[in-house]
Image (spheres, grey):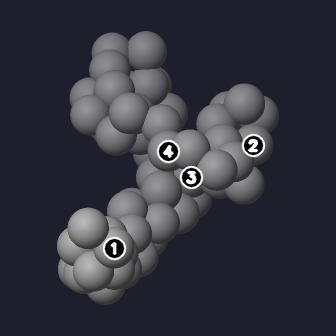
Amino acid sequence: LDVLERMVDTLGLPWYPMLKDATCFQKFAEEPRYQSVVSSIEKRMQDLRQRLPETLARFRALQ
């Protein structure tokens, strides 16, 4: 859990299906620290999705 908590502050994102579905994480499903990490990752993914259209528009403008 300590390593997972540090992932919240990294630039990259963990592979979400692994984080949610891997057998090794199932034992933490009810753990508040694990749930906090998952929520934080989900929020970051949502934020990135919201910025994606703007990012794509800028990229196309440069071509």
Q: Quadrant of the N terminus?
A: top right
Q: Quadrant of the C terminus?
A: bottom left
Q: Nearer the viewer, residue 14 or 12?
A: 12
Crowding near the residue tagged with mark 3, few <14, some 14–19, many ≥20 C-alpha atoms within 10 Å: some
* Labels 4, 2: front one: 4
Tell me if residue 52 can be seen. no
Q: Position of residue 53 (x, y in %)?
A: 23, 80
Mark sitting earlier along the chain (3/4):
4
* Residue carrying label 2: 6
Q: Are marks 2 and 3 in contact (CB under 8 Å)?
A: no
Q: Are marks 1 and 3 in contact (CB under 8 Å)?
A: no
Q: Position of residue 12 (x, y in %)?
A: 56, 44
Q: Which mark is residue 62?
A: 1
Mark sitting earlier along the chain (1/2):
2
- Which residue is painted at 34% across and 80% down in the image? 58
Q: Nearer the viewer, residue 62 or 53?
A: 62
Q: Position of residue 47 (x, y in %)?
A: 41, 76
Crowding near the residue tagged with mark 2, few <14, some 14–19, many ≥20 C-alpha atoms within 10 Å: few
Secondary structure, mark 2, is helix
Mark sitting earlier along the chain (1/3):
3
* Residue carrying label 4: 13
* Residue carrying label 3: 37
Secondary structure, mark 4, is loop
